[in-house]
């Protein structure tokens, strides 16, 4: 192997491993080492592992992109994947692409008027093949909707971003679903540091984008984590317009009775700490530091103590968590109403991590109830609780758990598409006269880590 160049060897190794393992277990890059770096305790020193260079990825014989579409896509790929150049025979996933980057690719392509779906990318991941399936629009869409699957006989399914604005879960989940319908991801709203829209304003933006794709109901929505509350708010607006809402699928969405017991900044700091791989010592350092400092300073501190790679640009992370903080402020002001709908709560059947359970902030009983607190505003018989293996994170991040979620979500959607499941106002079963609840947050992180 020493006589082969890196990309040739990476291609051979990837082909060998791909024949024996499922796709999600196949490495994107292969780095030749004389030995594994170890800590003083004899354990693998992950931080000392070298970052993969270009030739660590499976590269095809380079041929420059041809035409406007190939060239534009190649530029986006190179930027997202951190590569100097991309050839027309290169494969997006072999170069290190994954579901999170796939969603970013779709979003950036839409801005240029280049239209394709995530399904197109999964089926034709080579640049040349993908470009041949692309539609070039003279007027780029202003809706910002991410097309995951373009066609189907059933009404579309619209997924909502998580409270971090993360849509990465949508592509991998939709790929494993057995339901014949178009699938779209809703955009995260624009915001400024000085002003963030209310939940009602965000829902209104989303509603207008949805109606560009589907002018009339019945409408179907799903949302993961606290973003699922936005799906409910969109349904609220459509019901006011006398449109039918036939499906609301909440993926482990907690509705807290008292969301105001801690500040939005503290909530997001807890989420941030959960997303990092920390030993107990570093966790305690950052946990103490978080109480008196901003999110940006907490990220900088995490980088200084080695919890985040030193060469990582923190600007996007800071922006993401600041957006999430503002979204939590909007949720805290949103009075969740009782609606004449049924909801399906796909809840994680394992408890949160030890660190989350031991937080100074008590999560309350809602976090462990299969109904996740929604029985305060809806009658229990209108809430269909569906258990999914894993905790709040691993129900989506672990492929076997995600496959169970995809199957159960598909079964429910296929049932909801039947005509007798869509009476007036979408579904039977009404709300109660109980007082509205304030929206809340449960800790989550991106399936990509």
Image: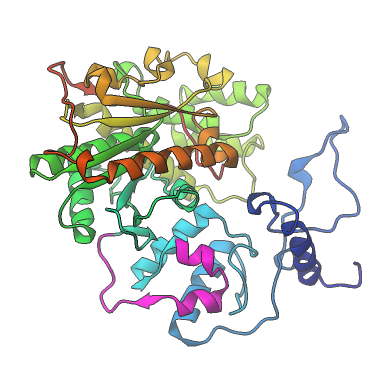
Q: Residue at x 32, y 41 (%)?
A: 415
Q: Residue at x 41, y 19 (%)?
A: 367
Horizontal side, residue 31 vs residue 116: left or right = right
Q: Where in the figure is residue 92, as x and y percent of width and height?
A: 58, 66
Q: Where in the figure is residue 3, as x and y percent of width and height?
A: 91, 72
Q: How does the figure colour the protein chain or chains?
A: rainbow
- Asked whether residue 382 is drawn in magenta, I would say no
**Quarter containing the N terminus:** bottom right
Q: Nearer the viewer, residue 203 or 412?
A: 412
Q: Which residues are magenta?
A: 119-143
**Quarter containing the C terminus:** top right
Q: Nearer the viewer, residue 98 or 45?
A: 98
Say which quarter of the image contains residue 148.
bottom left
Q: Residue at x 50, y 23 (%)?
A: 349
Q: Residue at x 21, y 20 (%)?
A: 377
Q: Where in the figure is residue 221, as x and y percent of width and height?
A: 29, 43
Q: Nearer the viewer, residue 176 or 154?
A: 154
Horizontal side, residue 241 vs residue 422: left or right = left
Whether 72 is drawn above or below 251: the answer is: below
- Can residue 257 be seen at all in this image of the molecule? yes
Looking at this view, name the residue that lies furthest to the bottom: 67
């Amino acid at each position: 192997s020493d006589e082969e160049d890196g990309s040739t060897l990476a291609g051979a190794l990837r082909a060998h491993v791909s024949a024996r393992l499922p796709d999600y277990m196949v490495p994107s890059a292969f780095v030749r080492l004389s030995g594994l770096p170890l800590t003083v305790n004899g354990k693998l020193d992950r931080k000392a592992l070298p970052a993969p260079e270009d030739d660590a990825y499976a590269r095809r014989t380079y041929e420059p992109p041809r035409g406007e579409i190939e060239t534009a896509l190649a530029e986006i790929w190179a930027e997202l994947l951190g590569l100097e150049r991309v050839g027309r025979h290169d494969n997006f996933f072999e170069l290190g692409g994954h579901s999170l980057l796939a969603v970013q690719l779709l979003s950036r392509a839409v801005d240029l008027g280049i239209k394709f779906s995530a399904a197109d990318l999964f089926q034709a991941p080579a640049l040349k093949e993908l470009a041949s399936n692309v539609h070039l629009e003279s007027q780029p869409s202003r809706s910002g909707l991410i097309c995951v699957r373009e066609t189907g006989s059933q009404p579309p399914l619209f997924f909502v971003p998580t409270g971090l604005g993360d849509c990465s879960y949508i592509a991998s989940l939709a790929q494993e679903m057995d339901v014949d319908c178009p699938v779209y991801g809703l955009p995260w709203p624009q915001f400024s540091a000085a002003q963030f829209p209310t939940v009602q304003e965000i829902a209104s933006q989303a509603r207008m984008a949805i109606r560009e794709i589907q002018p009339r109901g019945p409408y179907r929505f799903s949302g993961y984590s606290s973003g699922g509350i936005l799906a409910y708010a969109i349904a609220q607006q459509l019901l006011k317009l006398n449109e039918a809402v036939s499906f609301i699928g909440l993926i482990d969405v907690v509705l807290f009775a008292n969301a105001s017991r801690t500040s939005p900044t503290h909530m997001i700091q807890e989420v941030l700490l959960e997303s990092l791989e920390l030993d107990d010592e570093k966790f305690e350092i950052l946990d103490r530091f978080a109480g008196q400092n901003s999110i940006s300073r907490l990220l900088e501190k995490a980088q200084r103590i080695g919890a985040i790679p030193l060469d990582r640009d923190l600007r996007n992370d800071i922006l993401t968590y600041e957006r999430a903080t503002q979204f939590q402020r909007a949720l805290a002001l949103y009075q969740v109403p009782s609606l004449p709908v049924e909801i399906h709560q796909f809840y994680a059947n394992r408890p949160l991590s030890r660190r989350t359970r031991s937080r100074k902030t008590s999560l309350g009983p809602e976090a462990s109830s299969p109904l996740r607190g929604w029985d305060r505003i809806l009658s229990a018989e209108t809430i269909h609780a569906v258990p999914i293996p894993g905790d709040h994170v691993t129900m989506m991040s672990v492929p076997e758990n995600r496959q169970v979620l995809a199957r159960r979500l598909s079964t429910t959607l296929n049932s909801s598409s039947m005509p007798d499941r869509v009476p007036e106002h979408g579904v039977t079963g009404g709300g109660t006269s109980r007082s509205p609840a304030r929206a809340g947050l449960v800790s989550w992180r991106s399936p990509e880590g």
